[in-house]
Image (cartoon, helix red, strand yellow):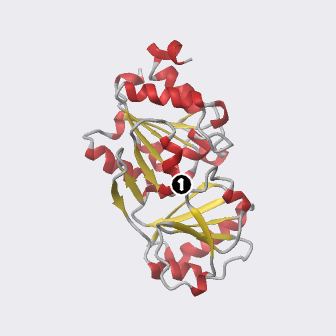
Amino acid sequence: MIQEKIKVVISDLDGTLLNSDHKISEYTKTVFQELHNQNYLIIVATGRHHLDAMPIVECLGIPLYLVTSNGARIHSPTKELLFAVNMESDAVKSVLSLDIDPEITTVLFRENVWQTNKHNEKLNSFQTELNYHPELVDFSTVEDLSAIKVFFTHDTHSKLLELREQILENHSSLFSHAFSLPLCLEFMDKSVDKSVAIAKILEKENLLFHEAIAFGDGFNDENMLKSTGKGLIMGNAPDSLKDKLSHLEVILTNDNEGVAKYLSKELLKKHTSEIE
């Protein structure tokens, strides 16, 4: 029975804790409040920027650790910044100077704004409230390109695969990278990964990976899912991720409240009738 050894609950946001409208359901909030009441440590680990993610997790109404930009930032339950790492300006400049397909949208996560080379409605739709503002820029005119994260998006996955190979040809030692979604290719400093950030939190709390359960749906969740005592893949995750991590259990989709229903059944069995 997993509830005997699990002390930590870790979840991604988009495609996992959030539904397709980028919101957390009332049922999910209730389950997480009960987890807090039963003294589980909660960690939310997302590719989103902290200014974007904080208002989302605040609606849970519980203290939690927040890992953002795939591990480039860690905030404590009191919103104190515990860890930060950026990509160096010259490294980003080297990537942006490549011959990138002009149809691809390029985004730089800066501390207070996200800079982009073009307006993208699909990206804007991820923010139900605009807390982290976009800024349209010509990157060739920007002197300091240091960034928390740089990512590229296009509706055609194959275009992003080509770009990934183009970038890695001469930059593989500088960056870590992942597809958070098939349409979103992300690059961070080489030291950055959700699992690395989570390890820092667990060490601080004197807890171990095998005492944690994790939920995710993207390739930026891969190491996190493999590291924890129990990793669960969302039903809406790409088949390629399910195939790669075929030893892990697949649960209900984000729109079917897969995370909350699994936690209610497996960790909160005694309280299921109260929650439902």
The residue positioned 66% from the left and 30% from the top of the image is 256
Instruction: Work out whether residue 132 or residue 11 is closer to the camera in this orientation and state it.
Output: 132
The residue positioned 41% from the left and 58% from the top of the image is 73
Q: Position of residue 85 (x, y in %)?
A: 38, 65
Q: Amino acid at mark 1?
A: Asp
Which residue in the protein does label 1 denote?
Answer: 52
Q: Position of residue 258 (x, y in %)?
A: 59, 31
From this view, report whether residue 76 is shown above or below residue 8. below
Q: Quadrant of residue 242?
A: top right
Name the image quarter holding the N terminus: top left
Q: Position of residue 58 (x, y in %)?
A: 48, 42
From this view, report whether residue 269 is shown above or below residue 17. above
- Numbered circles on residues, count: 1
Asked if residue 244 can be seen in this view, the reply is no
Q: Is residue 218 left or right of residue 67?
A: right
The residue positioned 37% from the left and 29% from the top of the image is 6
Q: Quadrant of residue 81?
A: bottom left
Name the image quarter holding the C terminus: top right
From this view, report whether residue 232 is shown above or below residue 140. above
The residue positioned 27% from the left and 46% from the top of the image is 203
Q: Position of residue 195 (x, y in %)?
A: 41, 50
> Label 1 neighbourhood size at 10 Å, few (<14), some (14-19), many (20+)?
some
* Circle 1: element type: helix
Asked if residue 239 can be seen in this view, the reply is yes
